[in-house]
Image (cartoon, grey):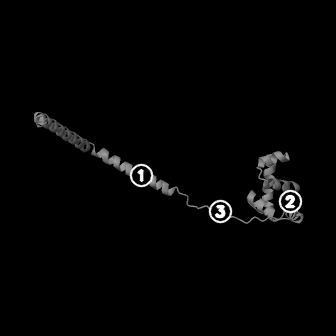
Amino acid sequence: MRLRLKLYQQTILYGLSLAALALLLRWLEFRLLILNHSFEIYAGIIAVIFTLLGIWLALKLSRPKIETKIIERPLIVNSTAFIFNKTFAQQLGLSKREIEVLQLMAKGLSNQEIADQLFVSLNTIKTHSSRLFEKLEVKRRTQAIEMAKKHALIP
């Protein structure tokens, strides 16, 4: 075994020296590549840093600042039958058609669905709705429904 190692010793030394020389040349080539393209490398590193900074800043700024809180109200269930408050309706000057529109609003129908059910135009329903809002002194459908339930205009 020693004899074989002696025979190949020179070949092994030449191989190792060639490998070391090839590694040295690769290292020099890599170093030269970095020196020749250092501006591009630095610009690329800066671009990556600013991209990451931009992503972080966008995520931080796009978070909602308003926190939604759910407030639950107790449900008031009247065991008595519904009795329409005619006096309050007369005080407000509500017509029968406006009361019908209000009842259909409370069912969750859209203006177009209410118009189809009452066989009138969409503009007529919009007019009835706006007059209801004025008479009840509210701005939205939900407020109108809540006010009507409060004063026993709808069940």
17 above or below 94? above
Label 3 vs 2, first from the N-terminus: 3
Callout 3 environment at 10 Å: few (<14), some (14 to 19), or many (20+)?
few
Label 2 vs 1, first from the N-terminus: 1
Please say if the residues under marks 2 and 1 sit with CB atoms less than 8 Å apart: no
Which residue has dot 2 on it?
94
In the rendered image, residue 99, in percent from the top left (x then y), is placed at 85, 56
Which residue has dot 3 on it?
70
Residue type for callout 2: Leu
Which residue has dot 1 on it?
52
Question: Closer to the camera: disc 3 or disc 2?
Answer: 3
Q: Nearer the viewer, residue 41 or 2?
A: 2
In the rendered image, residue 59, in percent from the top left (x then y), is placed at 49, 54
Callout 2 environment at 10 Å: few (<14), some (14 to 19), or many (20+)?
some
- 3D distance between C-alphas at marks 3 and 1: 36 Å
12 above or below 102? above
In the rendered image, residue 87, in percent from the top left (x then y), is placed at 89, 65
- 3D distance between C-alphas at marks 2 and 1: 62 Å
30 above or below 153? above
Q: Residue at x 84, y 55 (%)?
A: 98
Callout 1 environment at 10 Å: few (<14), some (14 to 19), or many (20+)?
few
Residue type for callout 1: Leu
